[in-house]
Amino acid sequence: MYIRRLTIVTLYVLTAIVGWAQEQWDTTLLMKEVVVTSKLTYREVIPSQKLSGAQLEGLSELSVADALRYFSGVQLKDYGGVGGVKTVDVRSMGTNHLGVSYDGIVLGNAQNGQIDLGQFSLDNVDEISLYNGQKSAIFQSASDFASASSVYIRTRLPQFEPGKHENWRVKMKYGASDLLRLSTLYERLLGTNLRLSVNTEALTASGKYHFRYHRKNLDGTTAWDTTAVRENGDIHAERLEANIHGVVNKGTWQLKGYLYNSQRGIPGAIVNNVWRRGERQGDLNTFMQGQYQKEVGNVFSTKWIAKYAFYRTHYVNRDSTILPVDHVYKQQEAFFSTANVVELMPNWSASLSYDLRWNKLHADTYRFAFPQRFTHSLSVATAIDYRHLKVQGSMVGTLVNDSQRPEGTKSHSSLSRLTPALFVCVYPLRQARWLSLRAFAKQSFRMPTFNDLYYTDFGNASLKPERASQYDAGLVLGKHFSRGLITHVGLQADIYYNKVKDKIIAYPKGQQFRWTMLNLGKVDIRGLDVMLEGSFRLSPSYATHPVVGTFRCQYTHQRSIDVTDASKSFYRHQIPYIPRHSGSAIVGLEWKSLTVNYSFLYTGERWNEQENIVYNHVEPWYTSDLSAAYRFKMGRCQMRVSAEVNNVFDQQYDVITNYPMPGRNAAVGVEIRL
C-alpha cells in the first residue's frame, strides 16, 4: 500500500513539474526535423520481423508479449487474464535464451532468467523487432551478440508539427473483467536539440471471467464438465516512464527512467475441482539508463551505455493445504557497455565491444545463498558489404564470476566461453535487390540462473551452462507494384536446425516436493518459418478516398524432440507445449478516418508432459479478434474512439494446461490528442 501511494504521489508531482516547465520554457522555440545518419551504424545482414506503431495500434492487445504472438517461430506462455505472467519462447530454445532490449539496452533477470513481457505496455511503443540468431549489425553491445534470439522494443521519439512545442495524449479503455486503463503521454520541446517525454499508465482489473472446463476419460467419456468464474486474477498496476532525447554534433544521447509497481493475484491451476488459490505477488521494478552515441570523423563511431536496476518481488501463499509462504526477493543490477566501430575500407568495417554486468540477489528465506555475479563480455566483429554480398562474423568471449555466502561461509566459481557466429546474405540478381538469400550459423550459451544454482533445497551449484547451436537458411522477396490490386508484397521463408545440449531440467530426488536441477536434457529442433505481408488497394488509384489495406500472415512448423536418453519412453517425442503447427494472420482496412482490423491466431495440438500419449494431449485452439477505430476532430483535439471484440467465437482453451483463458470479451476506448 505504501508503494502504491508513493507512486501516485510521484505521478502528481511529476505532472506539476511538467506544468511548471510548460510556463517557464520559451514558447517561441521551433524544432526543425533532425535526422542523424551514419554509414557505420546500420549494416544489417539479415532483416528482422517487425511490427510498427500503426500495426500495433490496430491489434487488440495490451502488452508487448501479446503482440509477439504474431511473429513466426514464437510461442507465448500465457497463464491467463490481464495480470497473468507472459513469457516468450523463440524456436523452442527456451525463454532464457531470448534477449530483450528496451530502447537499445538489454533487460536482465538473473534470478530466474525470464522477462515478464506482460509488464511492458504497447501504449508508448513505436516498433517491435524480432531477430533470430542476433541482430546482424555490428554496432551493438557484446550482450546483443551473445543472445540466441533477440527482441528489440523501441519507444516513441517525440515529433512536433511546425509551430508546436508540446503534445498531449490521453487514452482510456474499459472492458471485460472490470478492466480499466488510463494512460497519458506528454511531450515537450525543451530546445532546438532537446526533447522530453513522460508516459504514465494506471491499470486495474478484477480478472474475473467465466469459463467452461471439461475433461474426458481415455475411452472418450466425459470425466467432468463444469462452468465457473476465474478467481484471484486481479491486478492493480502503475507505470511511469520519462525520457530525455538530445542531439549533438554527429551524435545523439538519451536518458530514461522507468518504474512499474503492481499488486496481483496468481490464479493458479484448476486441479481437483479447486478454483481459488491464495497466492499473491507484488512487484516493484525500477531502472535508470542512459546512452550516448557519436560519430567521430567519417570512419569511427562510438556508443556508451550505463544502467542501474532494482527489482523487488513480494510473494505470499496462504493456501491452507500447505505451509504459509511470505518472502521478499530484492535484485540489483548494474550494467556498463561500450561499442566502437571503425570503417577499414568503404565496404569493410569492424567493431569492438565490452560489457560489464553485476547482479546481486537478496531474500529473507531460510539458508539463502545471497549470490552475486559479475559477467564480462568482449566481442569482436567485422562486416563486408560488397556488391551482391553481405557478410558478418563475430566472436564473443564471456567470463562469469559467481560468489555466494550461505550460513557465514563464502565460495566462488568462474566460467568462460567463446561463442562464434557467421551471417551471410547474397543478392543473386545483378540489377535488383528484391530477392536475397541468407544463412547463418551461431553458437551461444546461457548461464544457469540464481534459482537454478542456489535455490534452497532445490538448486545445484555444479550446473553447467546450456549450450546451443543454430543453423538457418532462407530467402527474402520484396516487390512494389504501381498498378493492380496489390501495391506491395514481401515474403520471408527460413528452414532451421537448432540443438541444445546440457538442457537444465528439474528432477525429483525421491521425496515428494523435493527436486534438484540437473544437466540431463538434449533437444533436437528442426523447423520452417514463413511470413507473408503486403498492402493492397480496393479502390481505383484515382479515387479521392481509396480503401487501402494491409495484410500479414505467418506459419511455423516445428519438430522439437527430446533426444536425451534412448532408454526413456519419451525419447524422440515432441517436447511439452511446442506445437508442430502454428500460425497467425492480420488484415487491416482503412477508409477516410475509419480503420478496421481482424487478427487470427492458431496453435496446433501439443502435449503437456514429456510422453506424447493420449492422456497428455492438449487440443489445438484458435482465436479471432475484431477491432474498429474512428478518428475525428473536435475543436483543437484530435479524437479517436475504438471498440474491439476478442475471441469472437468464444472458444474455450488453455495455453498452459489447467489455466483456462478468457472466452469472448469486449472493450471500448477513447484517445484524445492535443
Image: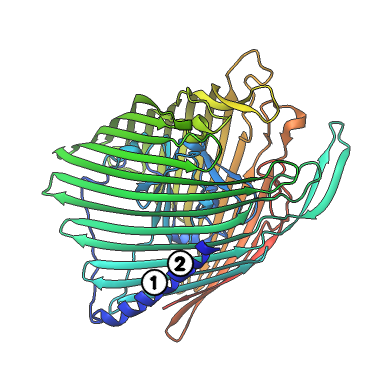
Q: What element carries label 2?
A: strand
Report whether residue 231 is seen.
yes
Q: Residue 14 carries which label?
A: 1
Q: Which amino acid does label 2 sit on?
A: Thr
Residue at x 54%, y 24% (from the top left corner): 523
- Rendered view: 482 above or below 99: below
Pointer 1 local density, CA inside 10 Å: few below 14, some 14–19, many at least 20: some
Residue at x 55%, y 52% (from the top left corner): 66
Q: Residue 200 carries which label?
A: 2
Report whether residue 147 is seen.
no
Along the horizontal axis of the image, is 490 left or right of 176?
Answer: left
Pointer 2 local density, CA inside 10 Å: few below 14, some 14–19, many at least 20: many
Percent position of residue 58, x then y: 52, 62
Q: In which quarter of the image is the C terminus?
A: bottom left
Nearer the observer, disc 2 or disc 1? Answer: 1
Percent position of residue 125, x then y: 43, 59
Q: Please state which of residues 107 and 144 is positioned toward the viewer in this rendering.
A: 107
Percent position of residue 608, x then y: 68, 34
Along the horizontal axis of the image, is 643 left or right of 531?
Answer: right
- Rendered view: 297 above or below 209: above
- Rendered view: 457 above or below 47: above
Task: Give residue 40's quadrant in the image.
Answer: top left
Q: Please state which of residues 164 and 597 is positioned toward the viewer in this rendering.
A: 164
> Which of marks 1 and 2 precedes in the sequence?
1
Q: Is mark 1 on a helix, strand or loop?
A: helix
Q: Residue furthest top?
A: 567
Do the residues under discs 2 and 1 have CB atoms within 8 angstroms? yes
Q: In which quarter of the image is the N terminus?
A: bottom right
Residue at x 33%, y 76% (from the top left corner): 166
